[in-house]
Amino acid sequence: QVQVVESGGGLVKPGGSLRLSCAASGFNFSDYFMTWIRQAPGKGLEWVSYISSSSTYIKYADSVKGRFTISRDNAKNLLYLQTNSLRVDDTAVYYCARGDGGKYPSSYYFYGMDVWGQGTTVIVSS
Amino acid sequence: SYDLTQPPSVSVSPGQTARITCSGDALPRQYAYWYQQKPGQAPVVVIYKDRERPSGIPERFSGSSSGRTVTLTISGVQAEDEADYYCQSADSTGTSYIVFGGGTKLTVL
């Protein structure tokens, strides 16, 4: 069935790094935008980043720009999020989700997310 | 930055109709999605592109749009519908950012 499974979370000290992974199955991964969304303890959902099917279009939330890098390997059906310079307020469950988006001749659109993983927990603490 | 505004909480009795609103300047131009999240679980999309219902989502869930406001309606609410609901859209100012509303806690009395 269609699913995405995150991994790579853990406990890290402020200033540290983690690489999160998301394994996709049950659909043609290379056809879809993919996203990362996070949820701090007791808080709402916060979009982090998305990447287009061929990595042409990438966007980051202002809160992570310059510290996080999204990437994908279409041959392996894997999505990544490299998180650097982690801060205490990056503590959250990080969700991978399939995106509903597509390309125009010289642009793209992105609407929302239709398949979510169960999340991986990142705790940033000294 | 672009905001989506939801009421923090909505309460209804079983069998009644729950309406959860979401307001934002870009909503006349951008699609809205609605996600249901139960405690300890990942979000699940219940409405996409303002009013489309994914397969497997009960017919009692519906979406509508009018100007700056989109509405998630749950007709004949059941106890299992108690959850947090988030609206989501895209910023239309050129940033192409994805934005979530603050979430609405639906309590079934």
Image (spheres, rainbow, N blue to C red):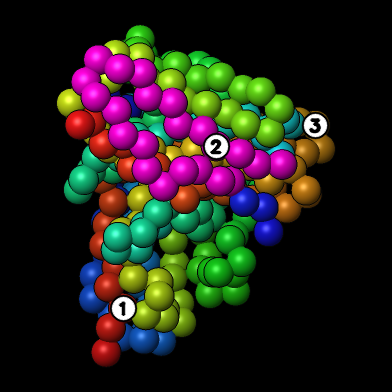
Quarter of the image with the N terminus of chain B in it: bottom right
Residue bearing mark 1: A124
The numbered mark 3 sits on a residue in which chain? Answer: A
Q: Which mark is residue B36?
A: none
Residue bearing mark 2: B22
> Would you identify the image quadrant in which residue B14 lies?
top left
> Would you identify the image quadrant in which residue B35 lies?
top left
Task: Tell me: residue A50, above or below residue A20.
Answer: above
The residue sitting at the right extreme is A106
Residue bearing mark 3: A105
Task: Tell me: residue B3, above or below residue B81.
Answer: below
Residue at point 56%, 19% (across, down) = B64
Residue A17, given in percent of the width and then of the height, sits at 38, 78
Query: How far is disc 3 from disc 2 in space, using C-alphas?
Result: 32 Å
Of circles 1 and 3, which is in front? 1
Residue at point 45%, 77% (across, down) = A84
| Residue A4 lies in the magenta stretch | no
The numbered mark 2 sits on a residue in which chain? Answer: B
Range of magenta residues: B4-25
Query: How far is disc 1 from disc 2 in space, using C-alphas?
Result: 32 Å
Residue B99, given in percent of the width and then of the height, sits at 57, 48
Quarter of the image with the C terminus of chain B in it: top left
Lower position in the chain sequence, tag 1 or tag 3? 3
The numbered mark 1 sits on a residue in which chain? Answer: A
Q: Secondary structure under badge 1?
A: strand
Q: Mark 3 near mark 2, Cβ–Cβ under 8 Å?
A: no
Of circles 1 and 2, which is in front? 2
Q: Secondary structure under badge 3?
A: loop
Same chain for the residues at labels 1 and 3, yes or no? yes
Q: Amino acid at mark 1?
A: Val
